[in-house]
Image (cartoon, helix red, strand yellow):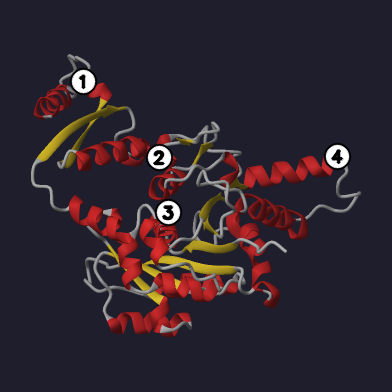
C-alpha cells in the first residue's frame, strides 16, 4: 500500500497579508533541507476561476507558471524558495471547485441526488488536494512526502468555510497523523500603548477551534521578538504547549525566516507530529540549498555596503507586489553582484511632458529620480 502524502495546513487569522506565504515556503525549506520531498497547494477562496483577470491594485502580480496557469504570487515564492515547478492545479479556487461539481451534476454523476456543500463540495476539495499532492514537482519524478497547503484569507471568512469543513476529515482518529495545522496570526502593537496585544490572536484561535480544526503550531507575527511571558500567555489561551508557540518577528531579509523557525525546533515538531520517516543525516548535506548555504545567504544579504539604485518605471508602482517577480529578480542579481539594492519606483505617467502646473512637480521629481539611478 502506498503511504499517503502527509499535509501541513497553514491558516491565517486577524488580517490577511501577515506572511503565510513566507511561513509556508520556510517550512518547505526546512523539510527539503533535511531530505524530504515537498510540494505546495495554494487555496484561494474566491469565485474567480483563476487570477488572470485580477487588477494588480487588488492582488499584486499574476504569476504565470510553466504550463501557462495564471495564479497567485505566492506560488512564485514556493518555486523560488524550493526550486520546484508547479502547475495550475496547485492553485485551487472556489470557482474551480464549483465548476467541477456543476459539470459533474450536469453529466448526471450524482445520480439525481441533491448536490450540497457537504458532502459534494467538500469531497471535491479533498479529492483535488490528495490528487495534486502526489504529483512530483522537483523534476526527479518522485512522489512528494509532504504537501504544504496554504489557505488564503483568514479563518472565519464565509468564503473559506467549505475548505475548512473539508479538512475536518483529518481530525478523525484514522487520519490524525496525516494533517498538521499551523495557524499564523499577528500580535498587534498599537502606537498609543507601545505594548504587544494578544487579544486579536486569541479571537482568531477561538474561531479556528470553532471551525473544527485544532492548531498544532501557533506562529506569532510581530514587529519585535516575543518575550517568554507573552508566549506563555498565548500558549495558555491557545491550549497548546509553550514550545508550540513560535515567534516570527520582522527581520532584515526573508531568508532569515527559515532559520528563525529552525532555532525554535519547528522541524522536529513537524517530523514528530506527522510521524515522518527519519532521513539519513549525512544525506542532508547534499541537499540544495541546505541550511548551511541558507545561513550564508541570509548573512550575505546584510553584509553589502555599496548600493546599486535601479529605477522601476510602471503603471502599478503604488503596489510593490504588482512587480513581485521583477523585484525578486533584481534582488537576486544584486546579491550576485554583491550590492545593496535600492529600487526607486516611478509612476510612468509622471515622465510625460506636461503644461499642467499641478503635475509639473511630479514630472521634475520623476526625472530627478531617474538621473540618480
Residue 179 position, x and y percent, is 59, 68
Using the numbered discs, state the Cα–Cα distance from disc 3 to disc 2 in whole angstroms: 14 Å
> Of the residues under marks 4 and 2, which one precedes in the sequence?
2
**Frontmost residue, 348 versus 257:** 257
Nearest to viewer (mark 3 / mark 1): 3
Q: Secondary structure at mark 2?
A: loop
Residue 315 appears left or right of 82: left
The quadrant of the image that shows the N terminus is: bottom right
Nearer to me, 55 or 293: 293
The numbered dot on residue 60 is 2
- The x and y percentages for residue 191 are 22, 66
Task: Examine the rendering and report whether any part of residue 331 can be seen.
Answer: yes
**Residue sitting farthest toward the front:** 282
Q: Which residue is mark 3?
A: 21
Which mark sits nearer the N-terminus, 1 or 4?
A: 4
Alpha-carbon neighbours of circle 1 within 10 Å: few (<14), some, or many (≥20)?
some
Q: Earlier in the sequence, mark 1 or mark 2?
A: 2
- Circle 3 sits in a helix, a strand or a loop, which is it? helix
* Residue at the spot 45% in from the left edge and 61% down from the top edge: 35
Q: Going 44% across and 49% down the picture, which residue do you hit?
A: 78
Q: Which residue is mark 4?
A: 107
Q: Classify mark 1: helix, strand or loop.
A: helix
Of tags 1 and 2, which is closer to the observer? 2
Name the residue tied to disc 1.
351
Q: Residues at badges 3 and 1 in contact (C-beta under 8 Å)?
A: no
The secondary element bearing badge 4 is classed as helix
Where residue 149 is drawn, which disc sits there? none
Amino acid at each position: 500500500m502506498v503511504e499517503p502524502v502527509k499535509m501541513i495546513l497553514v491558516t491565517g487569522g486577524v488580517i490577511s497579508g501577515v506572511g503565510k506565504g513566507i511561513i509556508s515556503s520556510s517550512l518547505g525549506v526546512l523539510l527539503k533541507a533535511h531530505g524530504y520531498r515537498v510540494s505546495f497547494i495554494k487555496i484561494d477562496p474566491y469565485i474567480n476561476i483563476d487570477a488572470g483577470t485580477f487588477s494588480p491594485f487588488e492582488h499584486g502580480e499574476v504569476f504565470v507558471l510553466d504550463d501557462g496557469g495564471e495564479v497567485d504570487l505566492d506560488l512564485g515564492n514556493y518555486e523560488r524558495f524550493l526550486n520546484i515547478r508547479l502547475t495550475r492545479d496547485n492553485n485551487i479556487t472556489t470557482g474551480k471547485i464549483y465548476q467541477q461539481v456543476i459539470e459533474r451534476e450536469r453529466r448526471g454523476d450524482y445520480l439525481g441526488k441533491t448536490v450540497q456543500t457537504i458532502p459534494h463540495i467538500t469531497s471535491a476539495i479533498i479529492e483535488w488536494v490528495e490528487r495534486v499532492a502526489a504529483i512530483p514537482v522537483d523534476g526527479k519524478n518522485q512522489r512528494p512526502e509532504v504537501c504544504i497547503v496554504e489557505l488564503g484569507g483568514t479563518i472565519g471568512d464565509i468564503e473559506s468555510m467549505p475548505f475548512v469543513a473539508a479538512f475536518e476529515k483529518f481530525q478523525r482518529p484514522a487520519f490524525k497523523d496525516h494533517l498538521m495545522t499551523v495557524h499564523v496570526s499577528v500580535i498587534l502593537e498599537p502606537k498609543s500603548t507601545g505594548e504587544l496585544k494578544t487579544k486579536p490572536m486569541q479571537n482568531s484561535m477561538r474561531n479556528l477551534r470553532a471551525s473544527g480544526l485544532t492548531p498544532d503550531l501557533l506562529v506569532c507575527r510581530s514587529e519585535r521578538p516575543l518575550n517568554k511571558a507573552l508566549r506563555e500567555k498565548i500558549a495558555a489561551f491557545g491550549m497548546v504547549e509553550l514550545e508550540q508557540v513560535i515567534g516570527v518577528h520582522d527581520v532584515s531579509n526573508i531568508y532569515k525566516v527559515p532559520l528563525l523557525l529552525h532555532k525554535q525546533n519547528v522541524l522536529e515538531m513537524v517530523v514528530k507530529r506527522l510521524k515522518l520517516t527519519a532521513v539519513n543525516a549525512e544525506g542532508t548535506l547534499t541537499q540544495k540549498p541546505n541550511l548551511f548555504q541558507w545561513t550564508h545567504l541570509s548573512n550575505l544579504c546584510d553584509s553589502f555596503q555599496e548600493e546599486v539604485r535601479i529605477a522601476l518605471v510602471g503603471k502599478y508602482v503604488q503596489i510593490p507586489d504588482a512587480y513581485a517577480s521583477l523585484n525578486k529578480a533584481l534582488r537576486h542579481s544584486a546579491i550576485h553582484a554583491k550590492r545593496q539594492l535600492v529600487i526607486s519606483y516611478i509612476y510612468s505617467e509622471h515622465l510625460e511632458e506636461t503644461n499642467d502646473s499641478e503635475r509639473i512637480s511630479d514630472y521634475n521629481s520623476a526625472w530627478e529620480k531617474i538621473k540618480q539611478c
